[in-house]
Amino acid sequence: MGDIFNQIFYQPLFNLLIVIYSFVPGNDLGVAIILLTVLVKLILAPLSWKQIVAQKALQDLQPKLEEIKKEHKDDKQALMQAQMKLFQEHKINPLSSCLPLLVQLPFLIALYYVFVNGLKTESFSMLYGFVPHPETLNTTFFGFLSLTETKNILLAIVTGAAQFWQAKMLMTKKPPKVPGSKDETFATMLNQQMLYVMPAFTALIVYQFPSGLGLYWLTQSVLSVAQQHLFLRFQNAKKQ
């Protein structure tokens, strides 16, 4: 890791994890990981909310985008102009769902390194002078889940299922078939594939890496599901 990234992201998050760990009854590292994940999620909540709003808006606009593609299928320039006009009418920036994720990305990468490397006592050299230096880390979550071991199949399956649930929540139901158009476009089929491929990929990563990373990923997914649930309830309340 670069020195700048290390000093700005990795080291502060690692120190925060150890501070939380020192206050957790029984010094349970798994509980500390969950609390750190919740804290980071709260800090990044405004960005996450904007990302959810943008994703949902783009998905709700898919039926009209399909009609435009059918209408201008032989004129790419007219197609682009019609799409931009549609985005302007609905006040949607097609890149707005990506920008919040890009801002969050350094934090997510830093957390990844914290949970992969920070579970080793060798990493204590990264602690600030005012942070309590534990002699060892209790890396067993609730006395049964080793956070340093890999290939936990149950954790991998549960995390993949949570990732699937998170992706499924924001999916728009398939719109009625537009006369003369194809049932599914390439983009629609790609989205369907990603719905299943990404959870499977997540489960594979969690299976290969230490369970501490899997516990973080599972907590992150569950919190994202809760946030999306609140968003959908808020959206439904506005429509009533």
Image (tube, rainbow, N blue to C red):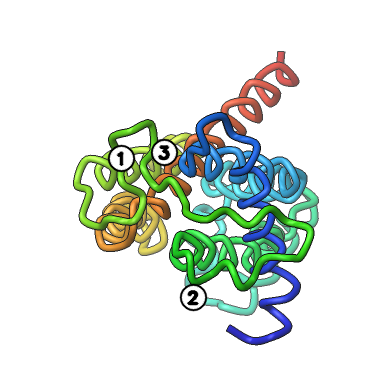
At x 75% / y 46%, what residue is drawn?
43
Left or right for 11, reference 180: right
66 vs 60: above or below = below
The quarter of the displayed image where residue 163 is located: top left
Foreground mark, 2 or 1? 1
- Find numbered disc 3 in the image and state the secondary structure of the residue it sits on: helix
Q: Which mark is residue 145?
A: 1
Name the residue type under label 2.
Asp
- Find numbered disc 1 in the image and state the secondary structure of the residue it sits on: strand
At x 71% / y 20%, what residue is drawn?
239
Position of the N terminus, as image quadrant, is bottom right
Left or right for 226, reference 166: right
224 vs 100: above or below = above
Tags 3 and 1 in contact by the CB under 8 Å rule? no
At x 50% / y 32%, what residue is drawn?
26
Mark before the other along the chain sequence, 3 or 1: 1
Q: In this view of the protein, which residue sits in the foreground, 59 or 216? A: 216
- Which residue has dot 3 on it? 168
Q: Position of residue 230 (x, y in %)?
A: 64, 25
At x 70% / y 42%, what residue is drawn?
49
- Which residue has dot 2 on it? 74
Name the residue type under label 1.
Leu
How would you rate the neighbour count of disc 1 (Cα within 10 Å): few for under 14, some for 14-19, many for 20 or more?
some
Q: CA distance from mark 2 to mark 1?
A: 58 Å
